[in-house]
Amino acid sequence: MSKKKSEKLINDQGLRVDGRKLDQLRPIKIEVGTLEKADGSAYIEWGKNKIMAAVYGPREVHPRHLALADRTLFRCRYHMAPFSTEERKNPAPSRREIELSKVIREAIEPSVFTELFPRTGIDVFIEVLQSDGGTRCAGITVASIALADAGIPLRDLVVACAAGKIDDQVVLDLNDIEDQKGQADLPVAISPRTGEVTLLQMDGNMSSEEYEKALYLAIEGCRQVHTMQRDTLKKKYAREHEVAVEAAGGEVESSESENQHENEGEATNE
Ligand code: ADP
């Protein structure tokens, strides 16, 4: 699908419609262990996107004939709530949601030690409560945290971020208006430890130089978001440690008890 440039998305000061610089991420807030009944869960606010991820498993597979003899059956469902868009979205899974579920599964599955749990299933549910562009990237990022929260052995977290082209400039992390009115969108997911790219899509047109620049920028964005992912998980385990020490009647040393991480709009979060 080719995107058409029609109105100004970058002003004379070089700022974007939401006031961001070209290489700046939207504000991101992550919480882990948000849902009590799932085996693992996480919630992300990425700009105006609000997305919940829940993980079940490893558990018995239904229907049973789908079970695999040598590994777990890893399934993902990406779904947008009817109230997640400006106009009510049909709650039935659309072609786009079915495709995104597959793409997201393929982006995350390489990080999971699926061979450790033959004949079982792991189910990942990604529920978009509010959408504003970039939901597949935010969905991958939050689902990976939910998998870690479920205690599922992972080779690495998976983190995703997009770059793209608006007003002939390469920019980081497009919002919905930029995605609709811009020239190109390039969502990327990586495994930060190895640098392996597990998702790479492109919508629109870019020159090879612009593509290289966008890919580099998206990977830089992934690395910033990965820091937030890791910090959120570390804080969760620090808090659990404090609770265990308290229960054992010991002294609690750390005062770091918040299990959420907030990035107040800064592109760099190191
Ligand atoms: P992504 O959310 O990964 O960028 P798309 O590029 O397909 O995926 O969608 C961009 C944005 O368009 C979404 O984040 C959402 O805000 C909006 N959108 C997608 N599908 C619909 C829909 N059926 N109705 C209204 N808005 C939608």
Image (spheres, grey):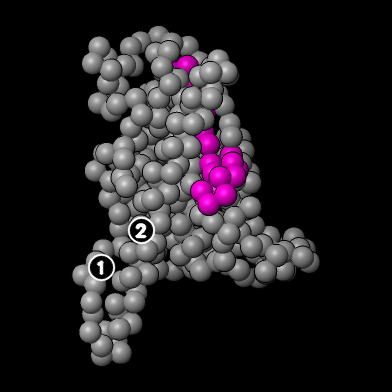
**Vertical placement of 225 versus 241: above or below?**
above
Residue 147 position, x and y percent, is 51, 60
* Element at label 1: loop
Chain part drawn in magenta? 182-199
Residue farthest toward the bottom in the current orientation of the protein: 249
**Vertical placement of 165 versus 56: above or below?**
above
**Disc 1/disc 2 C-alpha distance (Å):** 11 Å
Question: What amino acid type should be assigned to the residue bearing mark 2?
Answer: Thr
The answer to whether the residues at label 1 and label 2 have Cβ atoms under 8 Å apart is no
Image position of 198 (left or right of 63): left
In the image, residue 184 lies in the stretch drawn in magenta: yes
Q: Is mark 1 within 8 Å of ligand 1?
A: no
Q: Residue at x 40, y 25 (%)?
A: 171
The quadrant of the rendering that contains the N terminus is: top right
User: In the figure, residue 172 lies in which quadrant?
Assistant: top left
Q: Residue at x 70, y 65 (%)?
A: 115
Image position of 254 (left or right of 118): left
Say which mark, if any, is on residue 257: 1
In the image, residue 234 lies in the stretch drawn in magenta: no
Q: Residue at x 53, y 18 (%)?
A: 209
Question: What amino acid type should be assigned to the residue bearing mark 1?
Answer: Ser
Q: Residues within 10 Å of mark 2 (few under 14, many from 20)?
A: many
Q: Which residue is mark 2?
A: 232
* Element at label 2: helix
Residue 249 position, x and y percent, is 25, 90
The answer to whether residue 3 is visible is yes
**Vertical placement of 122 versus 131: above or below?**
below
2 or 205: which is nearer to us?
A: 205
